[in-house]
Amino acid sequence: MRIATRTAAITVLLLLGGVIVALIQGSIPAFREFGWGFLTAEKWNPATEKFGALAPIYGTLVTSFIAMLIGIPVSLGIAIFITELCPRSLKRPISTAIELLAGIPSIIYGIWGLFVLAPFLQAYVQPFLISLFAPVPVLSSLFSGPPYGIGIFTAGIILSIMVLPYITSVTRDVFETVPPVLKESAYGLGCTTWEVVRQVVLPYTQTGVIGGVMLGLGRALGETMAVTFVIGNAHKIAASLLAPGTTISAAIANEFTEADGDLYTSSLIALGLLLFVITFIVLAGARLLLLRLQKRAGT
Amino acid sequence: MALNSAMYRRRRFGNVVVMAFAWVAAASGLMILALILGTLLFRGFSGLSLAVFTEMTPPPGSAGGLLNAIYGSVMMTLLGTAIGTPIGMLAGTYMAEYGRGSWLASIVRFINDVLLSAPSIVIGLFVYEIMVVHMGHFSAWAGGVALSLLVLPVVVRTTEDMLLLVPNGLREAASALGSPRWLTIVQVAYRAARAGMITGVLLAIARITGETAPLLFTALNNQFMSSNMNAPMANLPVVIFQFALSPYADWQKLAWTGALIITLAVLALNVGARSLSQSRTND
């Protein structure tokens, strides 16, 4: 039994090694052909076999950024609501409902985003944003052009919904660990609820909240199907957030089965390797940050 | 003496703004869940009929069902679970029992976390490289293996966590009675951790039931009923993907029905796992 379990543990180890080796092996032709230019070129043309990863990388980073920009405050808001404002009897049903959002498969978000959210954004939200920011210098170019409905912006919104339950449930759990005495003494000094949250709860739960955010970010970076439905799949970097774009995962999902030619396939695998590296860096970065924060809190 | 009323009002105003935001955030979270489930029921329920479960995916313009897709999904989910669960449980057992605190356990834990958060599409690419390329064709075997790689890290994680929760006194008591290590693990530790370990497996199944990305280029899709595991096989998520993006109204309708079925299955698994772990904590 000892040997069997040890073998299984080593199998897990080898699998990850296998993933990395297979991805590197598959992407060698692309990197040999394009070199570092693969990372900085925007052109993606299967006909002439010229491939550059800049547009998908840009799309992945920007959609995840939008998702975090919306997702973090809303998740914190929900966590504050559940721990500080909500009547006791509603705590559990509301937490469960939010967690059910995490259970819904990503393809459901995709089909819902395409048929419900995108038309809604196109008809109401995007025209409003365009006219709202028209006089503001930088924002006017970010929110310009015709409201397509699908695009980077819509993908960011869908992702923000998908990361909500992850960040919320972690934040709520760590908020619950704050000793009541700490909060009560702050209230006793006359603090408002918001002041208690900002000065007592958040500093106390810092590491846990960051962990939750990183969990959400990891999901946003790698999310495939929901994004594929609503991003529009254009290998372009447009100035406007409302324009269609692409992400690493969406490009792979859309093109891989149709890719003919070794260079095309290899370029897509190279994209996969990049995605893996990006998520790995985020995870490792979060680990390091948490370790340092814990050390500082310990001494 | 009057309080510094300007500052007091500012503090109170700030509080009201943030609390109002928290209310709105919670309300919109619930509203989005209701909206998604409502849309699914509204657009998918009308298409739900016996034919969905008895007929195969149709060509555009004719009637049909999702039988082959449901069959394929069930087969590949079973295969993925059957491969991923035993390996995951054994590895988790090593980390919590034999190798507790060893360097191998801590490395595997880190690697497992990386696998757990690896984008599922990357797993699909990996299986494509090692299986589809060498076999020369897409197959249900490859799809099942891809899914098993998603099951594995979840099971490893929960098995280890649950076994670590088992009090050492139980193990020592069993050892004192003369039970060898393996018997202690099987008879004592596994029993104490059973509910948690089953929850982990259920959550893993829920995770792969709706998973689409890794199947796109492993199992591919199939218009016809096929029980040949060595050939491309239809599956619900990929059929939904293909049908939803098609221009045909009847295909889109089937996609919604499939989406409803998948969501109900996944939510049922989630609720089942949740109630299992809750009945455990209430003991």
Image: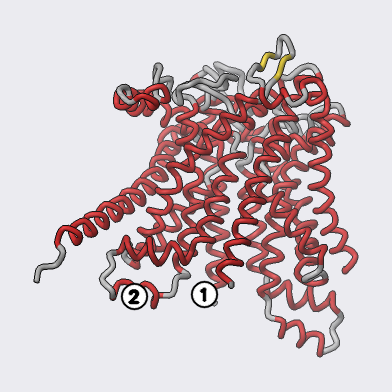
Viewer-nearest residue: B246 or B253: B246
Residue A255, image x, y percentages: 67, 22
Q: How is the image coloured?
A: secondary structure
Mark 2, other Cα within 10 Å: few <14 / some 14–19 / many ≥20? few
Task: Please say if B4 is above or below A264.
Answer: below
Q: Chain of mark 1?
A: B
Residue corresponding to mark 2? A184
- Foreground mark, 1 or 2, reads 2
Disc 1/disc 2 C-alpha distance (Å): 28 Å
Nearer the observer, A145 or A86: A145
- Can marks 1 and 2 be said to lie on one chain? no
Q: Residue furthest right?
A: A3
Q: Residue placed at 64% from the left, 36% from the top?
A: B212
The residue singled out by tag 1 in the image is B282
Which quadrant would residue B147 be assigned to in this image?
top right
Q: Secondary structure at mark 1?
A: helix
Image position, residue B190 (x, y; %): 73, 72
Residue B251 visible to the viewer: no
User: Residue at horizontal 39%, vertical 47%?
Assistant: B29
Residue for point 38% across, 53% down: A77
Q: Position of residue A81 (x, y in %)?
A: 35, 58
Determine which quarter of the picture holds residue B237.
top right
Mark 1 nearby-residue class (10 Å; few <14, some 14–19, many ≥20): few
Q: Quadrant of residue A56?
A: top right
> Element type at marker 2?
helix
Query: What is the chain letter for disc 2?
Result: A
Q: Answer left or right for A185 relative to B157.
A: left
Left or right: B190 in relation to A1: left
The amino acid on which the numbered mark 2 sits, given as a three-letter code, is: Glu
Instruction: Name the residue type under label 1.
Output: Asn
Which of the two residues, B178 or B227, is positioned nearer the viewer here? B178
